[in-house]
Amino acid sequence: MSKAARQSLKSASISVRGIVQGVGFRPFVYGLAVKHNLKGWVYNTSEDVRIEVEGAVEAIDKFKRELETKAPPLAHIESVNIEYHPPRGYKSFEIRQSQAQTGKYQLISPDVATCPACLGELLNPEDRRYRYPFTNCTNCGPRFTIIEDMPYDRPKTTMRYFQMCPQCQAEYDNPLDRRFHAQPNACPKCGPQVQLVDNRGNLIADSNPVAAASQLLKEGKIVAIKGLGGFLLACDATNDIAVKTLRQRKKRPSKPFAIMVATIDEAKKHCYVSPEEEKLLTSSQSPIVLMKWREDSAVSREVAPNLRFLGVMLPYTPLHHILLRDTGRPLVMTSGNLSEEPIARDNDEALRRLSGIADYFLIHNRDIYSRYDDSVAVVERSTSQLVRRARSYAPYPIRLPFNARQVLGCGAEEKNTFCLTKDNYAFLSQHIGDMENMETLEHFDSTISLYKRLFRIEPEIIAHDLHPDYLATKYARELSESGMKLIPVQHHHAHIASCLADNGLESPVIGVAFDGTGMGADGNIWGGEFLVADYRNFRRVGHLEYLPLPGGAAAIKRPRRTAIGYILTLLGENALNVVIATLNEVKGKQSQLASIGQVGEVEIEIIKRQIERRINSPLTSSMGRLFDAISALLGIRGEIDYEGQAAVELEMAAHALYGEEPSSVIARRVSDEAISDVRESYSYDIVEDEGIRIVRLKGLFSAVIEDLHQGISKERIAVKFHNTVARMINEMCHLVADETGISQVALSGGVFQNRLLLRKTVSLLESSGLQVFTHRQVPCNDGGISLGQAVIAHFAV
């Protein structure tokens, strides 16, 4: 080589950070280096992927450009840093052994749905992996659920127990094979195996256990299936008796189930599927997507009683693909647990906990390291929004607009998640569940330990909810005894901060935080809040008027008690007597007011005394409780079986007036109506008290009761009520905007899972000149609270 040629050569040291391990990144780098005739090496560390390439300057420039623009589909590059230096004289390009680094961390890929290439092999009778339930490659398969520590190498996963056969090892060692260093790589000869057992653990001898399980499902049996992150309970979704049996055994009377269907074409037989919903369903995340249910669907109405939306997902593992194709019909797929316990993970645990629910168990011998529920999402305004963040999303972090201290946000009591922050990342956990028992607390604690280990985080600050009795709060207080700083965070401030972080905002906003229950700074139960807030501070500028919850938790479970308490307080005893007297006239003609009429005289007297004497009758400003009261008043839902049921069914009553059209069509109609038809709503008053605006509800209840007397349908009243709340939000936000000059509005809290209300509210706000931010990456419900707690705590110290 001439001197001039040697001088034109350079060496470049490159560090790539992001999700770049377990996604085929090193073989991609290898192929790229060979393509551009570059020498050097690549290897994983605990922090990044390190690359050194040597060759012509122009070739290195092309290499760096294509490194970012042509990365593997599952890679997510956060940063690429490059330094140039003189050539070192490499003779070839090689993939070197990974190097662990103390204290360093790497982003981790979530589990990924089966890719088209693996699905093609799975369904090809000529392929050696035909019908093999654990087929995967660097573009798909388990990741987070099998990882014990980083760097991501097979000995640090639950696949270390399976020795690869020569064919699999050859794939694993070949840099040009898509299974190069695919840590879960396996085949029928050397990998995990499936077995079918009965609910006492007895082996069902069958050469094809998946086909046998499929036959049992077609016969109406309930089968527990070990998936990626735990067991799912399955039954024939078209079989009323099978679904009712599952409900009875699982002690889940009416909370909706999700279903799994084999293909997107089958999904379209049961739901109206928009292009955006189809894209989400078929994505590598493959979440449950809530879509408009078709009237002619063969899926039993027992799957989601009284609802107009159905949760649907496509198969996301090879085992699911085989099972769904063998069964030939949609299957209920719901978490393998009883009530609100954590999802069952291990074979022995599942047999112990689920033997009273499932008739049979489809198990396997690949261990699950971290429990993982299915994620749930909706598409609104052509954008996906998460309702539950778990499989295929966690543990990918939320990128923060600032560098954060190491903080642990412990989350809320219901729909719990936790959040750990470090650098400019917020690592929001997968859905943990309702913190109601020790099993969930143990799941919470063990998953915190896993995240701390994987991302090398040692929290110096702990944030928790103001409520002293939450298990997450007690957990935080116990941890603080070791010297960590403890920061209490108001629930609704956390909601708004979560929305800010979700959208990468830092400036103050008008925050609308609507939910069911949250401990207020004044000791009352908040839930219908208007705030001016950023990460550092919040100021309460408005709220719904305080009304009593007679019986406290009893009123939440029995919304008709809430309705009676509100009527007594707002309109008086005579008005309640008139309402109840009307029942005799209404009975036989329509069912409105029936649920209030079911409350006996003795209970009504108890409610009166509780309110008069302030006995177990806390005050609340909750919008969630207002939805409950109206639902009960209309005779829609007087008692609930699951959290939010009364409000959900009130929304469904309103949806009834919009016909059987796709959600995207209805959304446009709803938005247009919200702007044009403000007459179809009820009155309310906004008064100011010591600088805080309070929404008075007397006029609203009077008008709703009058409509009932006039025979107006509950569906029409439900629509008018939704219109009223949207108008209320719009008016309050403009009053605050005029006062503060703030024109950005953040909507958060579980009430905004109501798609009808969200559409109407956003349309009104935007049409009147305000900029609206809603949740996208994290749930608007309490599943996003821990993110808000963590970022607030960072600025509080």
Image (tube, rainbow, N blue to C red):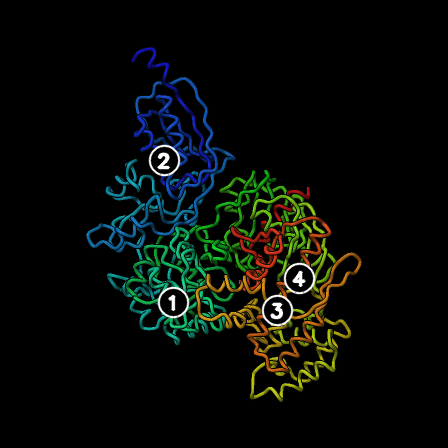
**Depth check, front residue: 639 or 680:** 680
Residue at the (74%, 80%) spot, across then down: 573
- Separation (CA) of disc 4 from disc 1: 36 Å
Q: Which numbered tag is attached to residue 26?
A: 2
**Above or below: residue 709 compared with residue 34:** below
Can you tell which quarter of the image residue 27 is in? top left
- Separation (CA) of disc 3 from disc 4: 11 Å
Question: The disc labelled 2 sits on which kind of residue?
Answer: Arg
Question: Mark 2 vs mark 4: which is more N-terminal?
Answer: 2
* Mark 1 Cα shell of 10 Å, populated few (<14), some (14-19), many (≥20): many
- Separation (CA) of disc 1 from disc 3: 29 Å
Residue at the (66%, 79%) spot, across then down: 706
Kind of element beneath mark 4: strand
Q: Among all residues in the image, which is located at the extreme right?
A: 690
Question: Mark 3 vs mark 2: which is more N-terminal?
Answer: 2
Question: The disc labelled 1 sits on which kind of residue?
Answer: His
